[in-house]
Image (tube, rainbow, N blue to C red):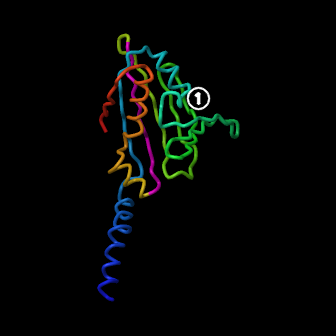
């Protein structure tokens, strides 16, 4: 009986306590940056990334977008394919060069900001997204760090955006 209890304790340690301890040791905050070049002028890129309601048409990750007004602020509710609802707002714009969005629900297991920078590159555009993220949940920290990577969602977004323009793009990671 004692051997069974020791075995169960070791399994519990390996499956629950050790991953939680690792998750708590990982940093809550991170910065990740991904970039692509699109064969489109900045105005065209801006028009698509600022049309939040249109995201479900070209980004398979997004099921639907709903615009709400809360306390005088416009909040976009992003319903994604993972059954998550991510509320975010625009906190800064400089069309067609810069867009800053922020997750507004502090009760989520993660949060942060995306800063989109669009720069002309001849007749094309360079689009760089910088994620200033925070992951509150230690299990999510493990998933983000070791399974999905901090660039996962940004890279998926940029690849889908390229497809929206009929382009095959490969995001690059910038000085992270």
Q: Residue at x 63, y 35 (%)?
A: 66
Front-lying residue, 162 or 75: 162
State the residue at coordinates (30%, 35%). Answer: 175
Instruction: Between residue 148 and residue 125, name the one nearer to us.
Output: 148
Q: Secondary structure at mark 1?
A: helix
| Disc 1 packing (10 Å; few <14; some 14–19; many ≥20) | some
Q: Quadrant of residue 158?
A: top left
User: What secondary structure do most residues of the magenta stretch adopt?
Assistant: strand
Task: Tell me, yes or no, whether the highlighted magenta stretch contains residue 132.
Answer: yes
78 with respect to 72 (left or right): left
Residue visible at 35% across and 25% down in the picture = 36
Position in image of residue 92 (x %, y %): 54, 30
Q: Which residue is mark 1?
A: 53
Q: Residue 15's spot in the image, x, y percent?
A: 35, 67
Q: Is residue 134 magenta?
A: yes
Q: How many marks?
A: 1
* Part of the protein shown in magenta: 124-137
Residue situated furthest top in the rendering: 123
Rendered image quadrant of residue 73: top right
Q: In the rendered view, would you say 40 is above or below 116?
A: above
């Amino acid at each position: 009986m004692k051997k069974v209890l020791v075995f169960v304790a070791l399994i519990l340690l390996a499956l629950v306590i050790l991953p939680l301890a690792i998750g708590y040791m990982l940093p809550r905050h991170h910065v990740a940056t991904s970039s692509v070049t699109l064969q489109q002028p900045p105005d065209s890129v801006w028009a698509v990334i600022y049309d939040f309601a249109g995201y479900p048409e070209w980004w398979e990750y997004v099921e639907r977008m709903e615009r709400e007004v809360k306390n005088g602020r416009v909040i976009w509710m992003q319903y994604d394919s993972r059954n998550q609802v991510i509320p975010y707002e625009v906190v800064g714009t400089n069309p067609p060069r810069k867009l800053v969005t922020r997750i507004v629900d502090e009760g989520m297991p993660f949060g942060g900001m995306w800063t989109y920078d669009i720069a002309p590159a001849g007749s094309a555009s360079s689009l760089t997204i910088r994620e200033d993220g925070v992951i509150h949940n230690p299990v999510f920290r493990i998933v983000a760090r070791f399974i999905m990577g901090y660039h996962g969602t940004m890279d998926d977004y940029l690849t889908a955006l390229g497809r929206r323009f009929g382009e095959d793009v490969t995001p690059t990671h910038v000085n992270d």
